[in-house]
Protein backbone atom coordinates (compact mmCIF):
# COMPACT_ATOMS: atom_id res chain seq x y z
CA UNK A 1 0.00 0.00 0.00
CA UNK A 2 1.28 3.47 -0.87
CA UNK A 3 2.01 5.78 2.10
CA UNK A 4 -0.62 8.26 0.90
CA UNK A 5 -3.24 5.49 0.83
CA UNK A 6 -2.32 4.44 4.39
CA UNK A 7 -2.57 8.07 5.46
CA UNK A 8 -6.00 8.42 3.86
CA UNK A 9 -7.28 5.24 5.56
CA UNK A 10 -5.97 6.37 8.95
CA UNK A 11 -7.20 9.93 8.63
CA UNK A 12 -10.60 9.48 6.97
CA UNK A 13 -11.84 5.89 6.95
CA UNK A 14 -10.86 4.82 10.48
CA UNK A 15 -12.72 7.70 12.21
CA UNK A 16 -15.86 6.92 10.21
CA UNK A 17 -15.60 3.22 11.07
CA UNK A 18 -15.49 4.17 14.76
CA UNK A 19 -18.34 6.63 14.28
CA UNK A 20 -20.54 4.09 12.50
CA UNK A 21 -19.73 1.36 15.04
CA UNK A 22 -20.61 3.70 17.91
CA UNK A 23 -23.86 4.93 16.40
CA UNK A 24 -25.07 1.59 15.02
CA UNK A 25 -23.61 -1.11 17.27
CA UNK A 26 -23.62 0.77 20.57
CA UNK A 27 -26.66 2.96 19.95
CA UNK A 28 -29.13 1.62 17.44
CA UNK A 29 -28.83 -2.17 17.78
CA UNK A 30 -29.38 -2.38 21.59
CA UNK A 31 -32.24 0.12 21.32
CA UNK A 32 -34.00 -2.04 18.72
CA UNK A 33 -33.33 -5.57 19.96
CA UNK A 34 -33.44 -4.66 23.69
CA UNK A 35 -30.86 -7.35 24.45
CA UNK A 36 -28.90 -6.60 27.59
CA UNK A 37 -25.30 -7.68 27.02
CA UNK A 38 -21.74 -6.41 27.49
CA UNK A 39 -20.50 -3.92 26.41
CA UNK A 40 -23.61 -3.38 24.26
CA UNK A 41 -26.77 -2.73 26.26
CA UNK A 42 -30.00 -0.72 26.23
CA UNK A 43 -29.19 0.08 29.90
CA UNK A 44 -32.49 -1.17 31.34
CA UNK A 45 -31.49 -0.63 34.97
CA UNK A 46 -34.20 0.96 37.16
CA UNK A 47 -36.65 0.87 34.23
CA UNK A 48 -38.84 -2.15 35.14
CA UNK A 49 -42.46 -1.26 35.76
CA UNK A 50 -42.31 -2.12 39.46
CA UNK A 51 -45.36 -2.24 41.68
CA UNK A 52 -45.30 -1.93 45.45
CA UNK A 53 -45.77 -5.70 45.78
CA UNK A 54 -42.67 -7.54 44.66
CA UNK A 55 -41.26 -11.02 45.19
CA UNK A 56 -37.67 -11.67 46.17
CA UNK A 57 -35.89 -15.00 45.68
CA UNK A 58 -33.35 -15.57 48.42
CA UNK A 59 -31.94 -18.07 50.91
CA UNK A 60 -32.19 -17.83 54.70
CA UNK A 61 -31.06 -19.74 57.75
CA UNK A 62 -33.91 -20.74 60.10
CA UNK A 63 -32.93 -21.83 63.61
CA UNK A 64 -34.73 -24.62 65.45
CA UNK A 65 -36.57 -21.94 67.47
CA UNK A 66 -37.86 -20.41 64.20
CA UNK A 67 -35.68 -17.27 64.06
CA UNK A 68 -34.73 -16.22 60.52
CA UNK A 69 -31.20 -15.10 59.70
CA UNK A 70 -30.49 -13.42 56.34
CA UNK A 71 -27.56 -14.89 54.39
CA UNK A 72 -25.27 -12.58 52.43
CA UNK A 73 -24.54 -12.79 48.66
CA UNK A 74 -21.16 -14.48 49.27
CA UNK A 75 -22.83 -17.34 51.17
CA UNK A 76 -25.78 -17.54 48.79
CA UNK A 77 -23.91 -17.45 45.50
CA UNK A 78 -20.17 -17.07 46.14
CA UNK A 79 -20.22 -13.48 44.88
CA UNK A 80 -20.29 -10.07 46.51
CA UNK A 81 -22.70 -8.76 43.84
CA UNK A 82 -26.20 -8.70 45.32
CA UNK A 83 -27.91 -8.67 41.92
CA UNK A 84 -25.92 -11.70 40.75
CA UNK A 85 -26.80 -13.53 43.99
CA UNK A 86 -30.51 -12.79 43.49
CA UNK A 87 -30.27 -13.95 39.89
CA UNK A 88 -28.52 -17.17 40.96
CA UNK A 89 -31.43 -18.04 43.27
CA UNK A 90 -34.05 -17.09 40.65
CA UNK A 91 -32.32 -19.21 37.99
CA UNK A 92 -32.06 -22.21 40.31
CA UNK A 93 -35.81 -21.95 41.05
CA UNK A 94 -36.58 -21.68 37.34
CA UNK A 95 -34.28 -24.60 36.47
CA UNK A 96 -35.41 -26.82 39.35
CA UNK A 97 -31.93 -26.97 40.87
CA UNK A 98 -32.76 -25.48 44.28
CA UNK A 99 -31.66 -28.66 46.14
CA UNK A 100 -28.25 -28.35 44.51
CA UNK A 101 -28.05 -24.63 45.37
CA UNK A 102 -29.08 -25.38 48.96
CA UNK A 103 -26.24 -27.92 49.27
CA UNK A 104 -23.75 -25.37 47.84
CA UNK A 105 -24.92 -22.75 50.34
CA UNK A 106 -24.49 -25.25 53.18
CA UNK A 107 -20.89 -25.74 52.03
CA UNK A 108 -20.24 -21.99 52.30
CA UNK A 109 -22.11 -21.43 55.58
CA UNK A 110 -20.77 -21.96 59.07
CA UNK A 111 -23.74 -22.06 61.46
CA UNK A 112 -23.37 -21.24 65.14
CA UNK A 113 -26.57 -23.08 66.03
CA UNK A 114 -28.61 -25.99 64.63
CA UNK A 115 -31.23 -25.18 62.03
CA UNK A 116 -31.92 -25.39 58.33
CA UNK A 117 -31.16 -23.44 55.18
CA UNK A 118 -34.22 -22.56 53.11
CA UNK A 119 -34.31 -21.40 49.48
CA UNK A 120 -37.40 -19.21 49.43
CA UNK A 121 -39.52 -16.75 47.48
CA UNK A 122 -40.87 -14.03 49.75
CA UNK A 123 -43.47 -11.48 48.65
CA UNK A 124 -43.62 -8.12 50.42
CA UNK A 125 -45.19 -4.73 49.94
CA UNK A 126 -41.89 -2.88 49.55
CA UNK A 127 -43.31 0.56 50.39
CA UNK A 128 -45.15 -0.77 53.47
CA UNK A 129 -41.94 -2.47 54.61
CA UNK A 130 -40.43 0.99 55.07
CA UNK A 131 -43.57 2.11 56.88
CA UNK A 132 -42.72 -0.64 59.42
CA UNK A 133 -45.15 -3.28 58.14
CA UNK A 134 -42.64 -6.09 57.66
CA UNK A 135 -44.98 -9.08 57.47
CA UNK A 136 -44.68 -11.05 54.19
CA UNK A 137 -47.70 -11.29 51.90
CA UNK A 138 -46.62 -14.83 51.00
CA UNK A 139 -43.67 -17.16 51.51
CA UNK A 140 -42.81 -20.20 49.36
CA UNK A 141 -40.07 -22.62 50.42
CA UNK A 142 -38.44 -24.32 47.40
CA UNK A 143 -35.76 -26.39 49.16
CA UNK A 144 -34.42 -27.01 52.65
CA UNK A 145 -31.24 -28.58 53.93
CA UNK A 146 -30.20 -29.27 57.51
CA UNK A 147 -27.26 -27.41 59.01
CA UNK A 148 -25.56 -28.54 62.23
CA UNK A 149 -23.51 -26.11 64.28
CA UNK B 1 -24.56 16.75 6.03
CA UNK B 2 -21.14 15.19 5.40
CA UNK B 3 -19.53 18.59 5.88
CA UNK B 4 -21.29 19.05 9.24
CA UNK B 5 -20.30 15.55 10.31
CA UNK B 6 -16.73 16.22 9.23
CA UNK B 7 -16.69 19.46 11.20
CA UNK B 8 -17.94 17.70 14.31
CA UNK B 9 -15.75 14.60 14.01
CA UNK B 10 -12.48 16.11 12.83
CA UNK B 11 -12.10 18.68 15.56
CA UNK B 12 -8.40 19.32 16.17
CA UNK B 13 -7.05 18.62 19.65
CA UNK B 14 -3.58 18.53 21.20
CA UNK B 15 -1.92 15.11 21.42
CA UNK B 16 -1.51 15.70 25.15
CA UNK B 17 -5.31 15.79 25.61
CA UNK B 18 -5.82 12.33 24.14
CA UNK B 19 -2.75 11.08 26.03
CA UNK B 20 -4.11 12.50 29.29
CA UNK B 21 -7.37 10.66 28.68
CA UNK B 22 -5.33 7.47 28.15
CA UNK B 23 -3.62 8.04 31.51
CA UNK B 24 -6.87 8.81 33.35
CA UNK B 25 -8.85 5.91 31.86
CA UNK B 26 -5.92 3.48 32.14
CA UNK B 27 -5.35 4.45 35.76
CA UNK B 28 -9.07 4.18 36.55
CA UNK B 29 -9.37 0.73 34.90
CA UNK B 30 -6.25 -0.62 36.60
CA UNK B 31 -7.33 0.62 40.03
CA UNK B 32 -10.83 -0.79 39.40
CA UNK B 33 -9.36 -4.22 38.61
CA UNK B 34 -7.21 -4.16 41.74
CA UNK B 35 -10.03 -2.96 44.02
CA UNK B 36 -12.48 -5.52 42.58
CA UNK B 37 -9.81 -8.26 42.35
CA UNK B 38 -11.63 -10.59 44.75
CA UNK B 39 -14.82 -10.43 42.69
CA UNK B 40 -12.91 -11.13 39.46
CA UNK B 41 -10.79 -13.86 41.06
CA UNK B 42 -13.70 -15.79 42.59
CA UNK B 43 -15.59 -15.71 39.28
CA UNK B 44 -13.39 -18.62 38.24
CA UNK B 45 -14.87 -20.72 41.07
CA UNK B 46 -18.55 -20.16 40.26
CA UNK B 47 -20.55 -23.31 39.38
CA UNK B 48 -20.54 -24.44 35.75
CA UNK B 49 -24.35 -24.47 35.57
CA UNK B 50 -24.38 -20.68 36.00
CA UNK B 51 -22.39 -20.03 32.81
CA UNK B 52 -24.34 -17.89 30.35
CA UNK B 53 -21.94 -16.30 27.88
CA UNK B 54 -22.54 -12.66 26.93
CA UNK B 55 -20.98 -10.27 24.42
CA UNK B 56 -17.77 -11.50 22.82
CA UNK B 57 -18.10 -14.71 24.88
CA UNK B 58 -21.66 -15.41 23.68
CA UNK B 59 -20.66 -18.98 22.72
CA UNK B 60 -19.51 -19.89 26.24
CA UNK B 61 -21.46 -22.75 27.82
CA UNK B 62 -18.88 -24.06 30.26
CA UNK B 63 -16.37 -22.23 32.45
CA UNK B 64 -12.76 -21.64 31.46
CA UNK B 65 -9.99 -23.24 33.44
CA UNK B 66 -9.52 -21.20 36.63
CA UNK B 67 -5.77 -20.89 36.08
CA UNK B 68 -6.27 -19.55 32.54
CA UNK B 69 -8.68 -16.87 33.76
CA UNK B 70 -6.49 -16.00 36.76
CA UNK B 71 -3.49 -15.61 34.44
CA UNK B 72 -5.50 -13.41 32.04
CA UNK B 73 -6.69 -11.27 34.97
CA UNK B 74 -3.18 -10.74 36.35
CA UNK B 75 -1.86 -9.99 32.86
CA UNK B 76 -4.62 -7.39 32.40
CA UNK B 77 -3.48 -5.56 35.54
CA UNK B 78 0.16 -5.56 34.40
CA UNK B 79 -0.84 -4.36 30.92
CA UNK B 80 -3.07 -1.72 32.56
CA UNK B 81 0.03 -0.19 34.17
CA UNK B 82 1.90 -0.26 30.83
CA UNK B 83 -1.15 1.24 29.05
CA UNK B 84 -1.32 4.07 31.57
CA UNK B 85 2.39 4.79 31.14
CA UNK B 86 2.07 4.60 27.35
CA UNK B 87 4.88 2.03 27.15
CA UNK B 88 5.14 0.21 23.78
CA UNK B 89 1.67 1.56 23.09
CA UNK B 90 1.16 0.23 19.56
CA UNK B 91 1.22 -3.25 21.05
CA UNK B 92 0.02 -2.67 24.61
CA UNK B 93 -2.85 -0.30 23.69
CA UNK B 94 -4.92 -2.83 21.72
CA UNK B 95 -3.85 -5.73 23.97
CA UNK B 96 -4.98 -4.08 27.21
CA UNK B 97 -8.28 -2.80 25.84
CA UNK B 98 -9.14 -6.26 24.44
CA UNK B 99 -8.02 -8.08 27.61
CA UNK B 100 -10.06 -5.72 29.79
CA UNK B 101 -13.04 -6.45 27.55
CA UNK B 102 -12.39 -10.19 27.93
CA UNK B 103 -12.04 -10.33 31.74
CA UNK B 104 -14.99 -7.98 32.28
CA UNK B 105 -17.12 -10.03 29.85
CA UNK B 106 -16.18 -13.28 31.58
CA UNK B 107 -17.14 -11.89 35.02
CA UNK B 108 -20.57 -10.99 33.64
CA UNK B 109 -21.07 -14.38 31.94
CA UNK B 110 -22.53 -16.06 35.04
CA UNK B 111 -26.20 -15.15 34.93
CA UNK B 112 -26.56 -11.41 35.19
CA UNK B 113 -25.19 -8.31 33.51
CA UNK B 114 -24.38 -5.35 35.75
CA UNK B 115 -23.67 -2.02 34.10
CA UNK B 116 -20.60 -0.63 35.83
CA UNK B 117 -17.98 -1.54 33.21
CA UNK B 118 -19.74 -0.87 29.90
CA UNK B 119 -18.58 2.69 29.31
CA UNK B 120 -14.99 2.26 30.50
CA UNK B 121 -14.64 -0.84 28.28
CA UNK B 122 -15.85 1.17 25.26
CA UNK B 123 -13.61 4.14 26.09
CA UNK B 124 -10.59 1.83 26.45
CA UNK B 125 -11.27 0.32 23.02
CA UNK B 126 -11.21 3.80 21.48
CA UNK B 127 -8.04 4.79 23.34
CA UNK B 128 -6.31 1.46 22.69
CA UNK B 129 -6.80 1.54 18.93
CA UNK B 130 -5.96 5.21 18.31
CA UNK B 131 -3.02 7.60 18.71
CA UNK B 132 -3.35 8.08 22.47
CA UNK B 133 0.21 6.87 23.01
CA UNK B 134 1.82 9.64 20.95
CA UNK B 135 2.48 11.90 23.93
CA UNK B 136 3.11 11.63 27.68
CA UNK B 137 4.57 8.16 27.40
CA UNK B 138 7.32 6.23 29.11
CA UNK B 139 10.27 4.97 27.10
CA UNK B 140 12.03 7.93 25.65
CA UNK B 141 11.76 11.54 26.60
CA UNK B 142 8.85 13.29 24.89
CA UNK B 143 9.84 16.09 22.61
CA UNK B 144 7.96 19.35 22.89
CA UNK B 145 6.89 18.70 19.30
CA UNK B 146 5.19 15.36 20.12
CA UNK B 147 3.42 16.74 23.20
CA UNK B 148 2.28 19.95 21.61
CA UNK B 149 1.03 18.52 18.30
CA UNK B 150 -2.45 19.75 17.49
CA UNK B 151 -4.39 17.72 14.94
CA UNK B 152 -7.74 16.10 14.11
CA UNK B 153 -6.10 12.67 14.54
CA UNK B 154 -6.06 13.43 18.28
CA UNK B 155 -9.48 15.06 18.20
CA UNK B 156 -11.72 12.46 16.56
CA UNK B 157 -11.11 9.70 19.15
CA UNK B 158 -12.19 12.21 21.83
CA UNK B 159 -15.34 13.02 19.85
CA UNK B 160 -16.10 9.29 19.64
CA UNK B 161 -15.60 8.93 23.42
CA UNK B 162 -18.04 11.80 23.97
CA UNK B 163 -20.54 10.20 21.59
CA UNK B 164 -20.30 6.87 23.45
CA UNK B 165 -20.90 8.60 26.78
CA UNK B 166 -23.92 10.41 25.38
CA UNK B 167 -25.34 7.22 23.82
CA UNK B 168 -25.20 5.33 27.14
CA UNK B 169 -27.16 8.06 28.94
CA UNK B 170 -29.71 8.57 26.18
CA UNK B 171 -30.35 4.81 25.92
CA UNK B 172 -30.82 4.57 29.70
CA UNK B 173 -33.28 7.48 29.55
CA UNK B 174 -35.22 5.94 26.66
CA UNK B 175 -35.37 2.54 28.45
CA UNK B 176 -36.96 4.11 31.51
CA UNK B 177 -39.72 5.82 29.54
CA UNK B 178 -40.13 2.82 27.21
CA UNK B 179 -40.53 0.24 30.00
CA UNK B 180 -41.92 2.36 32.81
CA UNK B 181 -44.19 4.49 30.62
CA UNK B 182 -46.19 7.32 32.17
CA UNK B 183 -45.75 5.78 35.63
CA UNK B 184 -42.02 6.46 35.33
CA UNK B 185 -42.61 10.18 34.84
CA UNK B 186 -45.16 10.36 37.68
CA UNK B 187 -42.50 8.99 40.02
CA UNK B 188 -44.41 5.80 40.97
CA UNK B 189 -41.96 3.48 39.23
CA UNK B 190 -38.97 5.28 40.75
CA UNK B 191 -40.44 5.16 44.28
CA UNK B 192 -41.27 1.46 43.94
CA UNK B 193 -37.81 0.84 42.48
CA UNK B 194 -36.05 2.52 45.42
CA UNK B 195 -38.24 0.59 47.89
CA UNK B 196 -37.80 -2.75 46.09
CA UNK B 197 -34.07 -2.36 45.58
CA UNK B 198 -33.42 -1.62 49.24
CA UNK B 199 -35.79 -4.35 50.40
CA UNK B 200 -34.12 -6.92 48.13
CA UNK B 201 -30.73 -5.97 49.54
CA UNK B 202 -32.02 -6.32 53.10
CA UNK B 203 -33.51 -9.74 52.29
CA UNK B 204 -30.27 -10.82 50.62
CA UNK B 205 -28.22 -9.71 53.61
CA UNK B 206 -26.41 -6.97 51.73
CA UNK B 207 -25.59 -3.32 52.32
CA UNK B 208 -28.63 -1.13 51.60
CA UNK B 209 -29.55 2.52 52.00
CA UNK B 210 -31.59 3.29 55.15
CA UNK B 211 -31.83 6.87 53.78
CA UNK B 212 -33.51 5.60 50.59
CA UNK B 213 -35.88 3.46 52.65
CA UNK B 214 -36.81 6.49 54.76
CA UNK B 215 -37.33 8.65 51.65
CA UNK B 216 -39.88 6.15 50.26
CA UNK B 217 -42.34 7.43 52.90
CA UNK B 218 -42.49 10.78 51.09
CA UNK B 219 -44.23 10.05 47.79
CA UNK B 220 -44.22 13.71 46.66
CA UNK B 221 -40.41 13.67 46.32
CA UNK B 222 -40.40 11.16 43.49
CA UNK B 223 -42.17 12.89 40.55
CA UNK B 224 -39.61 15.75 40.40
CA UNK B 225 -36.75 13.26 40.90
CA UNK B 226 -38.05 11.10 38.01
CA UNK B 227 -38.47 14.08 35.69
CA UNK B 228 -35.00 15.40 36.58
CA UNK B 229 -33.50 11.96 35.87
CA UNK B 230 -35.17 11.84 32.44
CA UNK B 231 -33.97 15.34 31.59
CA UNK B 232 -30.39 14.51 32.55
CA UNK B 233 -30.33 11.21 30.62
CA UNK B 234 -32.28 12.05 27.48
CA UNK B 235 -30.85 15.57 27.48
CA UNK B 236 -27.29 14.18 27.48
CA UNK B 237 -27.05 14.90 23.75
CA UNK B 238 -26.32 18.57 24.59
CA UNK B 239 -22.81 17.41 25.48
CA UNK B 240 -22.21 16.78 21.76
CA UNK B 241 -22.16 20.54 21.22
CA UNK B 242 -18.78 22.11 21.67
CA UNK B 243 -19.98 24.49 24.38
CA UNK B 244 -18.30 24.30 27.72
CA UNK B 245 -21.33 25.57 29.66
CA UNK B 246 -23.55 22.81 28.27
CA UNK B 247 -20.87 20.21 28.87
CA UNK B 248 -20.39 21.30 32.48
CA UNK B 249 -24.15 21.35 32.96
CA UNK B 250 -24.44 17.78 31.66
CA UNK B 251 -21.41 16.44 33.54
CA UNK B 252 -22.36 17.97 36.87
CA UNK B 253 -26.02 16.97 36.66
CA UNK B 254 -25.16 13.41 35.57
CA UNK B 255 -22.62 13.16 38.40
CA UNK B 256 -25.22 14.45 40.87
CA UNK B 257 -27.66 11.83 39.54
CA UNK B 258 -25.12 9.07 40.32
CA UNK B 259 -24.54 10.50 43.80
CA UNK B 260 -28.32 10.34 44.28
CA UNK B 261 -28.33 6.68 43.21
CA UNK B 262 -25.62 5.89 45.79
CA UNK B 263 -27.49 7.73 48.55
CA UNK B 264 -30.91 6.22 47.85
CA UNK B 265 -30.07 2.69 46.66
CA UNK B 266 -26.44 2.10 47.71
CA UNK B 267 -25.64 1.37 44.05
CA UNK B 268 -22.31 2.73 42.92
CA UNK B 269 -21.30 3.44 39.32
CA UNK B 270 -17.63 4.17 40.04
CA UNK B 271 -16.63 5.34 36.56
CA UNK B 272 -18.96 8.36 36.42
CA UNK B 273 -18.60 8.93 40.17
CA UNK B 274 -14.83 9.27 39.70
CA UNK B 275 -15.64 11.93 37.04
CA UNK B 276 -13.18 10.24 34.64
CA UNK B 277 -16.17 9.23 32.46
CA UNK B 278 -16.76 12.94 31.74
CA UNK B 279 -13.07 13.83 31.21
CA UNK B 280 -13.34 13.68 27.35
CA UNK B 281 -15.66 16.71 27.56
CA UNK B 282 -12.91 18.98 28.86
CA UNK B 283 -9.37 20.23 28.19
CA UNK B 284 -7.95 17.68 30.60
CA UNK B 285 -4.34 18.28 29.52
CA UNK B 286 -4.49 21.41 31.68
CA UNK B 287 -4.15 19.24 34.80
CA UNK B 288 -0.42 18.93 34.03
CA UNK B 289 0.07 22.66 34.48
CA UNK B 290 -1.67 22.83 37.85
CA UNK B 291 0.65 23.72 40.74
CA UNK B 292 0.18 20.40 42.51
CA UNK B 293 1.08 18.27 39.49
CA UNK B 294 4.02 20.41 38.38
CA UNK B 295 5.42 20.23 41.89
CA UNK B 296 5.02 16.44 41.92
CA UNK B 297 6.69 16.06 38.52
CA UNK B 298 9.42 18.64 39.02
CA UNK B 299 12.26 16.20 39.60
CA UNK B 300 11.69 13.76 36.76
CA UNK B 301 9.24 14.92 34.18
CA UNK B 302 7.98 13.40 30.98
CA UNK B 303 5.99 16.46 30.11
Image (cartoon, helix red, strand yellow):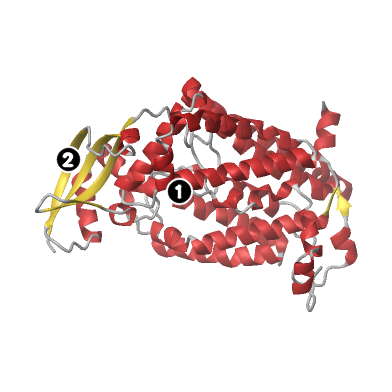
State the residue in front, A9 or B50.
Answer: B50
Q: Estimate the x, y position of residue B290 in percent, counting from the top left.
A: 79, 64
Q: On what subunit does the disc labeled 1 rest?
A: B
Residue at 20% x, 33% y is A138
Q: Residues within 10 Å of mark 2 (few under 14, many from 20)?
A: some
Q: Which residue is mark 2?
A: A141
Residue lying furthest top: B182
State the residue in front, B157 or B28.
Answer: B28
Left or right, A145 with reference to B244: left
Above or below B102: residue B9: above
Left or right, A123 with reference to B214: left
- Residues indicated by labels 2 and 1 sit on the same polypeptide chain: no
Q: Is residue A17 visible?
A: no
Left or right, B8 with reference to A63: right
State the residue in front, B61 or B113.
Answer: B113
Q: Secondary structure at mark 2?
A: strand
Amino acid sequence: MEPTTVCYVNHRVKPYIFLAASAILVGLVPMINQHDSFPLSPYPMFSSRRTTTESVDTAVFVTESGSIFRLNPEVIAGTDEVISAAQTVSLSIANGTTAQLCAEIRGRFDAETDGQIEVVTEVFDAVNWYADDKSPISRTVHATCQEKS
Amino acid sequence: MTRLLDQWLFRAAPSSRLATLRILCGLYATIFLVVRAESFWTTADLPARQVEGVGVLWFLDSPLSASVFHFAFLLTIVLGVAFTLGWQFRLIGPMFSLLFLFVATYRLSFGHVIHTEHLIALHLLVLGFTQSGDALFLGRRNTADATGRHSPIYGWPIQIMILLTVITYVLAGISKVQHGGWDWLTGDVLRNQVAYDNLRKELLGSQHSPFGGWLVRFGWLFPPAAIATSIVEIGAFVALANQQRLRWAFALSAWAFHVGVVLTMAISFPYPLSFVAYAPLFAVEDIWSTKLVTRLLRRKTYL
